[in-house]
Amino acid sequence: MKQFKVIFKFELRNYLTNKIFLGVTIFLVALIGVVMFFPRAAEALGGGEDGETEGSPEAGGRPVMLLSVPSGEAGSLMGEAFAAAFGRYNVRVLEDSLEEMEAQILDGTAECALVVESLNAYDYYVNNLSMYDRNTETADEVLKQLGQMQAMVDGGLSWEEAEGILSSRVSHEVFSLGKDQIENFFYTYIMIFALYMVILLYGQMVASNVATEKSSRAMEVLITSARPVSMMFGKVLASCLAGFTQLVAVFGSAVLFFNLNKEYWGGTAAVASVFDMPPELLGYMLVFFVLGFLIYAFLYGAIGSTASKLEDINTSVMPITMLFIVAFMVVMYSLADGNVDNILMKICSFVPFTSPMAMFTRIAMSSVPFHEVLISVAILVVSVFGVGVLAARIYKVGVLLYGTTPKLGSILKAIRKE
C-alpha cells in the first residue's frame, strides 16, 4: 500500500504541474467563460449603440423581413397574417421595387423578403440561404390558410367566420411514463463525448508515460523496487484523478458562469437543459465515467509497456482505440436514431468495454430495470479489477522486453511462466 501511495502521489503531481495540462485547463475554462458571458456582453454592447433605426435588422432585437403584397383588402389581410406567423421578424410591408428590396437585403438592412403575387404564388429573396431556413414552409402554410379562408368567403361565410373556423386550436397534454428523450438528449450527448475525449487523451498519456520510462531504462530500476500491481494502479488512478479534476474545473466553471448569466440564457432550452441534469442521473454518469475510464486506462498502460520505442505507441494502441471508436459509433448512431433499446445496445450494455457509454445512454434516454443496471455495474467493476491485475502482469513482463514489439502469444506465454 505504501508503494502505491508513493507512485500515486508522484504521478498525480506530474499531471497537475504539467504545463500542457494546466494550459489546456485554463484555456477551456476561459473559452467556456467567453461563451457563457457572450449574451450578456452582446446585450451590453448592442444596447449602447445610438445608430439603430427602426428599419435596421437590430431594431427591437428582431431582424427585418420585407413584404410585398397585392393592394386592397386581400393584401391587408396578407400583411396581418404574415406579421403574426413570422413573430421573430420585424415584418415591414413595402411598395418598393424589387431592385430596392434586393439592395436592402444585400447591404444588411433586411434579412429577407417575400414578394407575394397571389394566394398561389410568391418569391422569396435572401442573401445567404441557411440550411436551417424554414421561412418558405411558414409562408406556404400562411397562404394555404388564406386560400381556404377565401374559399369559405366565396361560399357565403364572412372573413371573421372563416378565420374563426381555421384558427380553432386543439389542446392536448403529454404524459411521459418513462423518460423524455428530447429533454435528456443534450447532456447525454455531452457526457458521451466527454468520455470519448478523456479516454483517448488520457489513455494515450498513460501509454506514452509507460513507454517513455521503458525507453529510458528507468523502468528496470522501478520494477525491482515496487510491485507491478502497485505501479500500474498508481499510474492509472493518478491519471483518472487528474482527468476528473480537469473535468470538474471545466464543467464546474460552466455551471458557475451559467448561473451568473442565467437570465440571458433563459430562452435557450437546449443550453438550460444541460444544467438541469437530475441528481440520480449525475450519479450514474460519475459511476460509468470513472469505471469506463479505468478499464481503458489499464489497457493503454499494459500496451504501452510492450512498446520498445515511443514512436510505436500509436501503432500498438490502435486495436484498443478502434474498439472504443466502434463502441462510440454504435452509441451515437442509436442516440441519433432515438432507438436506444435496440438489441445491439442491450448487448453492449453488459459488455464491459462498451457498457460505460451504452448503459448510461439507455438509463438517460429510456426506462431500464434497476437489476439490469446493477448487473452492468457489477460486471464492469469486476472487469476493471480483472483487467487491472492482468495489465499489471503484462506490465511486469512487457517492460523487460526490448527490440521488436512482442506478439500477444509470446506475452501470454511469459505471463503463464510467471
Image: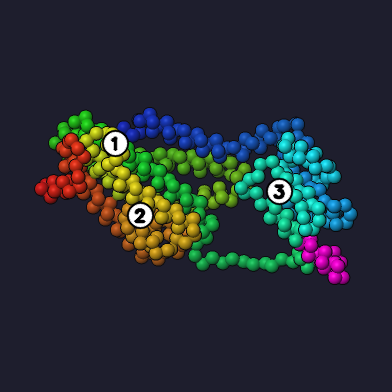
Quadrant of res 309: top left
State yes or no: residue 156 in magenta: yes
Residue at horizontal 45 percent and vertical 55 percent from the top = 333
Residue at horizontal 56 percent and vertical 39 percent from the top = 36
- The mark found on residue 208 in the picture is 1
Quadrant of res 5: top left
Q: Are marks 1 and 2 in contact (CB under 8 Å)?
A: no
Res 279 visible: no
**Residue under label 3:** 88
41 on left or right of 366: right
Q: Are marks 3 and 2 in contact (CB under 8 Å)?
A: no
**Residue under label 2:** 354
Tell me how far mark 3 sits from mark 1, CA to CA. 53 Å
Colour scheme shown: rainbow
Position in image of residue 38 (x %, y %): 59, 37
Q: Secondary structure at mark 2?
A: loop
Q: Residues within 10 Å of mark 1 (few under 14, many from 20)?
A: many
Give the mark, 3 or 2, whose residue is nearer the N terminus.
Answer: 3
Which amino acid type is marked by label 3?
Arg
Tell me how far mark 3 sits from mark 2, CA to CA. 44 Å
Q: Compared to 358, does 248 lie above or below?
A: above
Residues drawn in magenta: 145-162
Position in image of residue 250 (x %, y %): 45, 40
